[in-house]
């Protein structure tokens, strides 16, 4: 909370006319405390921002179990849990896509997903296809653009929103129809 208590931070945001929707956090350190503090100030989500490429599909299944546990903790505190993807979860491992494994092994009543559209596109995947495949699971998204003509292997191709290559009009329209609720410009 930027050196403030949770309540001080909420007050500061209120003074600025802002509402705190979500926060990324380290889920491996004091998660119950973080969930209690977030719930106390009316946040909607705590989000795991990164796993990193795991060695095996079983490692992703274990991560899904952890996500379910985090979802239970969040539910007890009046908020939701979500996972923010990167490109690695759309890269085949042991013949499977880790993103499928995470989505199929998490409880939809406890775990949502924050689609980072840039990373889906950078991995060579189609955001609309994923929104259609898992309707209602992607509740949040990160909206950031990608340089026109950038090769997929170029992971550092972020550019100012609106001048890049990503078709946000179609993606966000589909997202809205498939249950997306929060659009975070990054």
Image (spheres, rainbow, N blue to C red):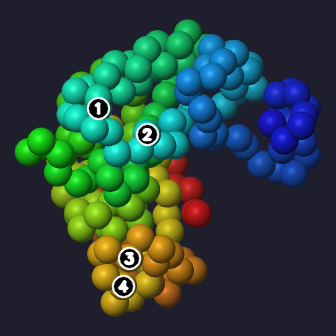
Distance, label 1 to label 2, CA atoms, is 9 Å
Q: Can you give x and y, in whole percent of width and height, for residue 83 in the image? A: 44, 38
Question: Circle 2 — which element?
Answer: loop
Residue for point 28% across, 38% down: 55
* SS state under label 3: loop
- Residue 154, numbered label: 3
> Would residue 2 appear left or right of 40 to someone viewing this image?
right
Say whether disc 1 or disc 2 marks the residue closer to the N-terminus.
2
Asked if marks 3 and 4 touch (Cβ < 8 Å), the reply is yes
* Residue 150, label in figure: 4
Q: Tell which residue pokes out farthest to the top in this image.
A: 76
Percent position of residue 158, x then y: 50, 75
Which secondary structure lies at badge 4? loop
Quadrant housing the C terminus:
bottom right
- Left/right placement of residue 60 relative to residue 28 reads left
Gap between marks 3 and 4, in whole Å? 6 Å
Most foreground residue, 79 or 90:
90
* Rendered-image quadrant of the N terminus: top right
User: At x 31% / y 22%, what residue is drawn?
Assistant: 62
Residue that badge 2 annotates: 51
Mark 1: give few (<14), some (14-19) or many (20+) Cα within 10 Å: many
Query: Farthest residue toward the front?
Result: 55
Which residue is the site of mark 1? Answer: 60
Instruction: Look at 46% across and 34% down and name the residue there.
Output: 82
Between the C-alphas of marks 2 and 4, the distance is: 25 Å
CA distance for labels 4 and 1: 29 Å
Q: CA distance from mark 3 to mark 2?
A: 20 Å
> How far, Cα to Cα, is label 3 from label 1?
25 Å
Q: Residues within 10 Å of mark 3 (few under 14, many from 20)?
A: few
Are the residues tagged 1 and 2 within 8 Å (C-beta)? yes
């Amino acid at each position: 909370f930027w050196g403030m208590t949770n309540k001080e931070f909420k007050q500061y945001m209120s003074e600025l006319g802002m509402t705190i929707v979500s926060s990324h956090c380290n889920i491996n350190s004091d998660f119950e405390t973080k969930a209690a503090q977030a719930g106390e100030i009316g946040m909607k989500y705590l989000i795991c921002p990164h796993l990193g490429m795991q060695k095996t599909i079983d490692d992703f299944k274990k991560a899904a179990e952890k996500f379910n546990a985090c979802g239970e903790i969040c539910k007890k505190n009046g908020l939701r849990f979500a996972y923010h993807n990167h490109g690695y979860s759309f890269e085949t491992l042991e013949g499977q896509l880790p993103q499928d494994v995470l989505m199929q092994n998490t409880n939809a009543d406890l775990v949502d997903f924050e689609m980072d559209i840039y990373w889906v596109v950078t991995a060579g995947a189609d955001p609309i296809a994923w929104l259609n495949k898992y309707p209602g699971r992607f509740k949040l998204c990160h909206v950031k653009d990608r340089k026109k003509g950038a090769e997929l292997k170029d992971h550092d191709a972020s550019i100012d929103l609106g001048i890049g290559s990503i078709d946000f009009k179609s993606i966000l329209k589909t997202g809205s129809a498939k249950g997306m609720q929060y659009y975070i410009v990054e």
